[in-house]
């Protein structure tokens, strides 16, 4: 894959922006690291609702190379970015851009804030008798939340 991409690039080529939603976000993370390893000019990586991609070693390697250029956007009540579980060894990469339920956003919020938002999300799902943890994963939910900023 990188050979095919390199064949289209010239020294004057503009940097590459990589993005994806859900599984596409996970593939964007893997693609960005592969591009970086092959000296392709990755300017930034933007993911939406991306699950955790690798273990601590993968996360450390990725963050060393691309952590400051990667922005993982997460809706407050989206369950997918919380999978696979931390207890299985999976870790997040890059900067976490957290979209709060009401309005507003924060970058790399503290753990207590994330735990509180998880509790509020579960309470909202129970109270409203609907699965907001799944509906908040749809890309339309991300578009709606971002348009409110």
Image (cartoon, helix red, strand yellow):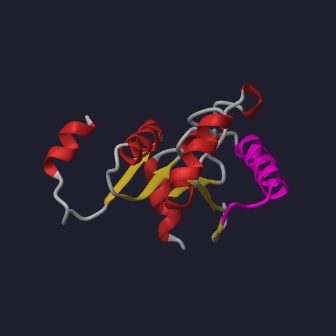
Inspect the magenta stretch and tell me whether residue 76 lies in it. Answer: no
Left or right relative to 141: residue 55 = right
Left or right side of 22 for 94: right
126 within the magenta span: yes
User: Could you tell me residue 16's position as x and y percent?
Assistant: 31, 57
Q: Nearer the viewer, residue 97 or 146?
A: 97
Q: Position of residue 138 (x, y in %)?
A: 48, 45
Return the residue nearer the eye: 83 or 1. 1
Q: Residue farthest to the top?
A: 88
Name the residue: 39% across, 40% down: 34
Residue 102 lies in what quarter of the image?
Answer: bottom right
Measured from the top left, where is residue 135 in percent x and y? Answer: 55, 43
Residue 80 is left or right of residue 10, and the answer is: right
With respect to residue 149, does 56 lie above or below?
above
Q: Residue at coordinates 72% horizontally, 26% vertically from top-left?
A: 88
From this viewpoint, is residue 136 visible? Answer: no
Residue range of the region highlighted in magenta in the rendering: 107-128
Q: Quadrant of the N terminus?
A: top left
Q: Is residue 32 visible?
A: yes
Question: Relative to the observer, which residue lies in front, 142 or 22?
Answer: 22
The picture places residue 11, in percent across and down from the top left corner, at: 20, 61
Answer left or right for 33 relative to 106: left
Q: Quadrant of residue 95?
A: bottom right
The secondary structure that dominates the magenta segment is helix
The quadrant of the image that shows the C terminus is: bottom right
């Amino acid at each position: 894959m990188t050979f095919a991409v390199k064949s289209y690039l010239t020294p004057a080529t503009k940097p590459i922006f990589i993005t994806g939603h859900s599984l596409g976000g996970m593939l964007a993370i893997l693609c960005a690291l592969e591009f970086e390893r092959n000296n392709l000019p990755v300017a930034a990586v933007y993911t939406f609702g991306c699950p955790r991609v690798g273990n601590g070693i993968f996360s450390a390697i990725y963050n060393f190379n691309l952590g400051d250029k990667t922005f993982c956007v997460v809706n407050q009540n989206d369950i997918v970015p919380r999978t696979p579980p931390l207890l299985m060894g999976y870790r997040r990469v890059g900067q976490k851009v957290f979209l709060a339920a009401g309005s507003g956003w924060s970058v790399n919020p503290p753990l207590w804030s994330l735990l509180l938002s998880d509790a509020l999300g579960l309470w909202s799902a129970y109270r409203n008798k609907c699965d907001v943890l799944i509906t908040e994963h749809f890309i339309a939910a991300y578009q709606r939340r971002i348009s409110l900023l």
